[in-house]
Amino acid sequence: MPKKIGSLTLYSVDDLHELLGLSKMTIRAYLRDGKIKGRKLGVQWYVTEDAIRNYFEEPDPTPEKTPVKQKYIIQGINDLVSETEECETIDETIDLLNEQAIISLFQVKVVDASSGEVLELVKARDFIERHS
């Protein structure tokens, strides 16, 4: 049974378990993780009606992943070819690879444009097959 303190109604974990049909462990986990806002008085958690309302009104807090801006570096794989070309798009990279006489002498380094971190190293032929 919820506790009334003046105009404030407080719900315990047991109350929420009965009302929402969630396990007590799940409710406690939501409280610990901050998914449901509550306060601990002694050893008992309490939640207000507003906190319950806010939980159901809030959008899912999973952040949308922004795609990583990539650049593509075409480079020779041995001493015979020492060329290196940087491209901004996949299409530009494929066009440049298709101009090469011997494609097997090249590889494409996929790089995070903002950090410079190498994300992947791909044989030129595999790159063309993947993106064509």
Image (cartoon, grey):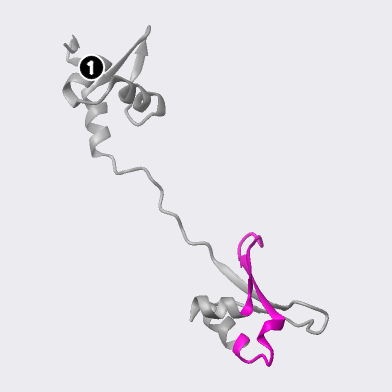
> x, y (%) of residue 103?
66, 86
- The kind of residue on which mark 1 rests is Tyr
- Residue 6 in the figure: left or right of residue 105: left
Q: In which quadrant of the rendered view does residue 39 lie?
A: top left
Could you tell me which residue is drawn at 46 percent across and 58 percent down?
A: 66
Residue 12 is at least partly visible in this image? no
Residue tagged 1: 11
Instruction: Residue 55: give x, y in percent of width and height.
Output: 27, 33
Q: Which region is colored magenta?
A: 97-124
At 57% from the left edge and 68% from the top edge, which residue is drawn?
70
**Does residue 92 lie above or below 21 as drawn?**
below
Question: Is residue 106 on the magenta stretch?
Answer: yes
Q: Position of residue 110 (x, y in %)?
A: 61, 69
Is 112 magenta? The answer is yes
Residue 57 in sight in this render: yes
Residue reaching furthest right? Answer: 79
In which quarter of the view is residue 69 placed? Answer: bottom right
- Above-or-below relation of 67 to 122: above
Question: Dot 1: what SS?
Answer: strand
Front-most of 119 and 115?
Answer: 119
Q: Foreground: 105 or 44?
A: 105
Image quarter where the N terminus lies is: top left
Q: Is 8 placed above or below 114 here?
A: above
Q: Position of residue 95 (x, y in %)?
A: 57, 88
Residue at 23%, 38% (x, y): give it.
Answer: 57
